[in-house]
Amino acid sequence: MTAQAAPHPRDSVARLRLPDGGWVQVDGPLTPGVPLVLLLHGFHGGLASMTGAQPGRVGWREALLASGFSTFSYTQTAPDGPLAPNLEQLAEIAAGPLSNDPRLRRLPLAVVAHSRGGLLARMLLDRAARQVRLRGILDRTRQVITLHTPYAGSGLAGLAVGVDRSARRLQAAVASLGLRPTVLASLCSLSASPAVAELAPGSPTLRELAGRPAPAGVPWHTFGGISADLRRIYPLLDPAGPSRRPSAPARIARSRGLTEVLGVLDRLALLSPALRDGEGDVVVADASARLPWAASHTVNRLTHVEALWDTGLQRQVIALLGDHPVLAAA
């Protein structure tokens, strides 16, 4: 894969145009010997998930740049689709600009991945161990840090898949939860998504990945969340408040009925530890975010979405990147 330089924003070192039409954004000083941090977003995310900032919130790119690191970020080719095309895209990026661009090819690498992005990192390094053209990427990777990644599956995805098996037969019971027919139809549509099925506990994709050997020589650090307090999610859906124009996440939530769905998740908590406070972050149970061979695992009282902006979590990750001890947030 080749990349062409293009005009870039003032705060970027470069924007690289990929043959598939996507963009890679490189930010920071590109200091020799200091890891270039590859930011991988999760399902239904995008470049802005890891680089965007909102009033009162600092994104991962800004936090890392402020600590002297450089970042490499992009939008996956199929954010709502299965892992396979996103893995192919990442492998081409790894064999292309990360390996060939003269500004990047000699820098050590680190990965900070949110949610499903951690599975992509796992799959990339597994492939790098088996393909000569990617071996240099494996050798350069200093560490991988994953945030609320569903290694053993997402409980929320499992419930969505279960909709097809139960809700269609139990329309009256689901209606009693307060979901409008249009919202129920959306859930049934979600249950048919191959990408969601991949993330359900026990899926063939996750079983196959779990059977792969750990990437040799790469320290892996995992983080999990144990807040399923839905009251913490609503402000994230509408940070502008009622007196201002709703934010984009809020508009999406309202149009898709997500607010209604969140309003009944507490009644479904018995069905999945991901939805139980003290055990999960609404989407992924802490137990599912762990790897038996990881160098460390840290637990914070965060929901899944809060991992995108939480300053305490950012301090923990930056400490790891700087090889300092990590303390759990209060």
Image (cartoon, rainbow, N blue to C red):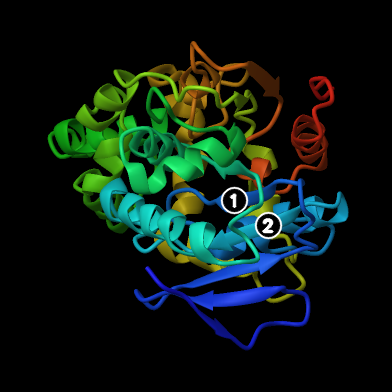
Q: Position of residue 54 (x, y in %)?
A: 75, 63
Work out whether residue 70 or residue 197 is closer to the camera in this orientation and state it: 70
Residue at left 65%, top 17%? Answer: 296
Q: Point out the image quarter for the N terminus.
A: bottom left
Q: Position of residue 66 (x, y in %)?
A: 87, 55
Q: CA distance from mark 1 to mark 2?
A: 6 Å
Residue located beneath label 1 in the image: 38
**Do the numbered discs 1 and 2 sit on residues whose CB atoms are within 8 Å?**
yes
Vertical position of residue 75 compared to residue 126: above or below:
below
Q: Position of residue 79 (x, y in %)?
A: 39, 58
Residue at left 55%, top 20%? Answer: 286
Q: Point out the image quarter for the C terminus.
A: top right
Residue located beneath label 2 in the image: 71
CA neighbours of label 1 inside 10 A, class few (<14), some (14 to 19), many (20+): many
Work out whether residue 138 or residue 280 is closer to the camera in this orientation and state it: 138
Callout 1: SS: strand
